Image (spheres, helix red, strand yellow):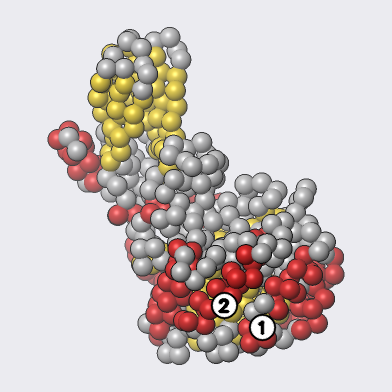
């Protein structure tokens, strides 16, 4: 790092955007961690392909860390594990599937006893036939049989499981429901009978206990809820929205997208609560045209990543979600806490998109440096400051002829459990330039789309 860049980074480090530490402390105080009654690991997209492979190792590490984290505040430790689909990597019809399911089972049993700490899951597209079809229920039955009856001791509705592929399980005093799509294209849909079953079951459960949360697992995201749920028709579904809006006690957990839990948009509240599960195996991101991508939605460092959640309930019915970075073996940021369901819907106000976006502060930038070298330049800048973190940067280089080149740089927020670990500065090259006068501009954006001040530098090559 040059002296100028070091000074700039130190100057930026001195800029403090007003935070909300007192508010966060008060919010956290609503959950009573001295009286935890239930602890559930919540995962998605483990994509296990063997016991001794990297995905298998990541799955085992996730289970171990969830077990140990739960034991810190829960006297009887971890009570169950929920997985929102894609347990294994190859679909049911693939010859590798059977061995992968055996590996999945062996890893789970090497850490946890399924008879004492039940596993509840909904199948993902990788578990069946890459896409959901009218044959999905049949595929689901075959999938269930490969784990054996010992993995289904918490099921209460064997009929729904056998006829619809849906599950109704109970762990402690909390109910967990699972539903499986029956089509993928042009949109993800669910069988009418499955939707009727879900509606009837939710009505029965919430009528009996209106102030207790009910958990729903479904692999695809619910449209326009959490981070990533607007990526496209293959990734999210609008088939459940109207039904969920009738049950404010529901917390949905979904996967499929692999988006990082560091982003505050991974929890959403509207007529119900929706939570993204991240991914145990690797990360994906929106198609934002970022630099250093291996594909439109996958970063080059996507495998240096593994995330999930620890969901806990206290004796009053409040919930806490601890975001887990299994790759770095540390919790991510502040815990998300939910007060128990209230008849007036007040428990759904904390994590609304509109409310948090309105309270959000825009990022701040303070330094921009250009270093010419032959037919290229290096544009260096100190990382922006934000009340959460900078999500990405936009650099635009414009020549005297008006021709411009724009580069979008995704910040490294997904690599660090805390924003304080993010890199202090960046250097972005522009190559193949002709002699002449140029202008470079830099703007930072946070997760809510708030735009920083724009820094501009003119130079001659």
Residue at horizontal 45%, vertical 12%? Answer: 402
Q: Residues within 10 Å of mark 2 (few under 14, many from 20)?
A: some
Among numbered discs 2 and 1, the one appearing first in the sequence: 2
In the depicted view, which residue is nearer to us: 360 or 127?
A: 127
Residue linked to disc 2: 105
Identify the residue at horizontal 39%, vertical 14% (top origin): 399
Which quarter of the figure has residue 379?
A: top left
Residue 307 seen = no
Residue 149 visible in the picture: yes
Q: Which corner quadrant holds the C terminus? A: top left
Q: In the structure shown, which secondary structural element does the residue marked by tag 2 occupy?
A: helix
Q: Secondary structure at mark 1?
A: loop
Above or below, 106 against 417 in this view is below
Quadrant, the N terminus:
top left
Seen at 42% across and 77% down, the residue is: 64
Label 1 neighbour load within 10 Å: few <14, some 14-19, many 20+: few
For the residues bearing labels 2 and 1, Cβ distance under 8 angstroms: yes
The residue that mark 1 highlights is 148
């Amino acid at each position: 790092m040059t002296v100028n860049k070091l000074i700039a980074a130190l100057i930026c480090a001195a800029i403090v955007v007003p935070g909300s530490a007192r508010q966060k402390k008060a919010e956290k105080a609503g959950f009573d961690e001295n009286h935890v009654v239930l602890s559930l690991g919540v995962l998605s997209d483990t994509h296990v392909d063997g016991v001794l492979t990297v995905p298998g190792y990541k799955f085992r590490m996730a289970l171990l860390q969830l077990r140990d984290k739960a034991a810190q505040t829960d006297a009887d430790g971890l009570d169950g594990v929920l997985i929102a689909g894609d347990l294994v990597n190859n679909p049911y019809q693939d010859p590798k599937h059977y061995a992968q399911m055996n590996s999945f089972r062996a890893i789970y049993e090497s850490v946890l006893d399924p008879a004492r700490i039940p596993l509840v899951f909904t199948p993902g597209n990788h578990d069946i036939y890459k896409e959901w079809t009218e044959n999905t229920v049949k595929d689901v039955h075959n999938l269930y049989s490969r784990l054996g009856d010992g993995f289904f001791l918490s099921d209460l509705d064997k009929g729904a499981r056998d006829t619809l592929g849906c599950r109704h399980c109970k762990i402690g005093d909390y109910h967990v429901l699972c539903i499986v799509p029956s089509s993928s294209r042009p949109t993800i849909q669910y069988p009418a009978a499955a939707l009727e079953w879900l509606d009837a079951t939710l009505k029965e459960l919430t009528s009996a206990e209106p102030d207790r949360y009910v958990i729903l697992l479904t692999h695809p995201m619910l449209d326009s809820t959490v981070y990533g749920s607007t990526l496209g028709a293959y990734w999210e579904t609008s088939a459940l929205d109207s039904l969920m809006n009738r049950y404010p006690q529901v917390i949905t957990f979904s996967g499929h997208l692999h988006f990082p839990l560091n982003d505050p948009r991974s929890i959403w509240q509207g007529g119900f609560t929706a939570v993204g599960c991240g991914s145990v195996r690797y990360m994906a991101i929106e198609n934002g045209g970022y630099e250093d991508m291996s594909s439109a939605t996958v970063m080059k460092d996507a495998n240096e990543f593994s995330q999930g959640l620890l969901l806990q309930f206290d004796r009053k019915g409040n919930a806490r979600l601890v975001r887990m970075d299994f790759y770095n073996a540390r919790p991510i940021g502040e815990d998300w806490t939910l007060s128990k369901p209230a008849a007036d819907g007040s428990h759904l106000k904390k994590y609304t998109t509109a409310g948090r976006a309105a309270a959000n502060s825009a990022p701040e930038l303070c330094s921009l440096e250009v270093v010419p070298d032959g037919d290229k330049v290096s544009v260096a800048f100190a990382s922006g400051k934000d009340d959460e973190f900078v999500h990405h940067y936009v650099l635009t280089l414009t020549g005297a002829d008006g021709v411009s080149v724009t580069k979008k740089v995704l910040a490294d927020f997904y690599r660090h459990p805390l924003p304080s670990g993010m890199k202090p500065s960046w250097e972005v090259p522009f190559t193949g330039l002709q002699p002449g006068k140029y202008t470079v501009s830099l703007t930072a954006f946070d997760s809510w789309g708030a735009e920083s001040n724009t820094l501009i530098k003119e130079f001659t090559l």
